[in-house]
Image (tube, grey):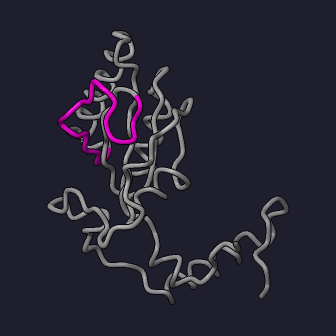
């Protein structure tokens, strides 16, 4: 399979919402406490404007769904993804975090489109749907992620930006040059 290079298809398939699942061994009081401290820190930082991230109210103290240990979910729109990912990388301590996109293909999101911050855990994917009719929107009231109504760059504007980047990098010896096709 070759990677997609059609500009319109790439833009149209861009992931707009993500989940971070914070894992802790449910019988390990120190890990459970660390996970809750991290959750409170994320909530404080959201309140203070560092990023938009929405931890689910529920903290699962037992395995649930595909998740084999205690966990909770943090929803994040693409507009804040880099800030949340960066924060969790730097502040997770010894906790493991499953990161996956939200698309119509929930099983594939958890199976092949995911990544881990920290050690991975085996997931039970048997109960996840292969394909859904709709993208699972969350927190549409925020008007972020898939619910955003912010103006988008046109294809022509994107091409102009790309051409400008290529022009600027033309004399950079370490920067790979784009194919001329």
Which of 4 and 43 lies nearest the eye of the viewer?
4
Indicate the position of residue 6 as horizontal and vertical percent values: 60, 84
Indicate the position of residue 105 as horizontal and vertical percent values: 42, 64
- In the image, is residue 71 above or below residue 150? above
User: Residue 68 appears in which quarter of the rendering?
Assistant: top left
Judged left or right of residue 179, residue 94 is left
Q: Residue at x 73, y 69 (%)?
A: 169
- In the image, is residue 48 above or below residue 40? below
Which of 11 and 165 lies nearest the eye of the viewer?
11
Q: Residue at x 43, y 49 (%)?
A: 126
Q: Residue at x 19, y 34 (%)?
A: 58
Magenta includes 24? no
State the residue lying farthest toward the front. Answer: 126
Figure label count? 0
**What residue span does the magenta drawing correspond to?**
51-68
Which of 99 and 61 lies nearest the eye of the viewer?
61
Q: Main secondary structure of the magenta part?
A: loop
User: Residue 132 appears in which quarter of the rendering?
Assistant: bottom left
- In the image, is residue 12 above or below residue 48? below
Judged left or right of residue 64, residue 89 is right
Magenta includes 54? yes
Indicate the position of residue 159 as horizontal and vertical percent values: 57, 84
State the residue lying farthest toward the left. Answer: 141
Quadrant where the image shows the N terminus: bottom right
Judged left or right of residue 107, residue 27 is left
Quadrant where the image shows the C terminus: bottom right
Indicate the position of residue 41 as horizontal and vertical percent values: 29, 28
State the residue lying farthest toward the top. Answer: 29
């Amino acid at each position: 399979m070759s990677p997609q290079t059609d500009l319109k298809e790439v833009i149209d398939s861009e992931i707009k919402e993500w989940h971070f699942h914070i894992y802790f061994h449910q019988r390990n009081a120190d890990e459970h406490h660390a996970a809750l401290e991290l959750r409170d820190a994320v909530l404080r930082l959201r309140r203070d404007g560092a990023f938009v991230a929405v931890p689910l109210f529920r903290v699962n103290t037992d395995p649930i769904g595909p998740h084999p240990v205690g966990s909770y979910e943090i929803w994040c729109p693409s507009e804040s993804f880099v800030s949340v990912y960066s924060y969790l990388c730097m502040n997770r301590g010894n906790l493991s975090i499953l990161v996956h996109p939200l698309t119509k293909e929930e099983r594939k999101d958890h199976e092949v489109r995911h990544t881990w911050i920290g050690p991975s855990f085996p997931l039970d994917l048997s109960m996840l749907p292969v394909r859904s009719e709709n993208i699972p929107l969350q927190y549409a009231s925020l008007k972020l992620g898939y619910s955003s109504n912010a103006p988008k760059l046109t294809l022509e504007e994107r091409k102009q930006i790309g051409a400008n980047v290529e022009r600027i990098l033309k004399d950079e010896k370490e920067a790979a040059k784009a194919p001329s096709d």
